[in-house]
Amino acid sequence: MKKHLHFKIYKPFGMLSQFISNDEKEARKKHFLGELYDFPEGIMPVGRLDEKSEGLLLLTTDGKLSDTINQSGIEKEYYAQLDGEIPHEDILQLERGVLIGLSGKKYITKPCRVKALLDPPLLTDPDKKLRIGTHRPNSWISITITEGKFRQVRKMTAAVGFPTLRLIRVRIGTQILEDLQPGTVAQIDSL
């Protein structure tokens, strides 16, 4: 029986959650996971993070396990830096679910857990391309969801009037980002 391999990485801001591109023009302009490490053949990401998001991404050579995790409703926790100081009422609204656009249709997100982070989390400095102004008020939240719709957290915070400036996934199930730095890869025993 083939032994499957599993990794966790800190996907940096500005990198796509794929290994290569078949589009020559895109391949010259974008950054891909394959630049981080000499991954084994058959490796695939478990879920995705968009190009402007960063943080924990799991990888495996076990396609069945990847499908199971993606469809299981497993918790995913994010730290989101928001444009403005989000009041408690809007945090409660996020927890109950908000109306977002999804594939041209309206969608109400499932209930989730949200808490205000009174102190900014200890993270690496943001990518310079983010241009987060220090003169404007902002706030941080921790948001834990069990679904993973396209750009869901960003759409949720925008729906209550607080666009996401920076988004970092810090946990998937029991796997945590820990002290990984952007672009680092760690092989793990299991997912």
Image: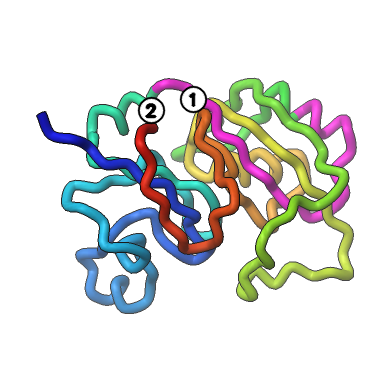
Instruction: Give percent across and percent down for residue 142.
Output: 71, 39
Of residue 38 and residue 142, the one placed in the foreground of this image is 38
- The residue at 26%/56% (across/down) is 39
Q: Earlier in the sequence, mark 1 or mark 2?
A: 2
Q: Residue at x 35, y 36 (%)?
A: 189
Residue 38 at x, y percent in the picture: 26, 62
How far across and how far down the image is residue 90, in percent?
Answer: 82, 34
Look at the image and say whether residue 145 sits in the magenta stretch: no
Q: Residue at 31% of width from left, 71% of height from top? A: 26
- Tell me which amino acid carries mark 2: Ile
Q: Amino acid at mark 1?
A: Ile
Instruction: Using the image, tell me which numbered label, if any, was put on residue 69.
Output: 2
When the figure is inspected, residue 16 is found, relative to residue 171, above or below; the finding is below
> Which residue is farthest left?
1
**Secondary structure category for the residue under label 2:** helix
Q: Where the C terminus falls, by quadrant?
A: top left
- Position of the N terminus, as image quadrant, is top left
Q: Residue at x 87, y 30 (%)?
A: 89
Q: Which residue is mark 1?
A: 74
Q: Which residues are magenta?
A: 72-93
* Residue 85 in magenta stretch: yes
As rendered, which of 11 and 30 lies closer to the eye? Answer: 11
Q: CA distance from mark 1 to mark 2?
A: 7 Å
Q: Quadrant of residue 123?
A: bottom right
Q: Is residue 34 above or below residue 152?
A: below
Contact? badges 1 and 2 (CB < 8 Å): yes
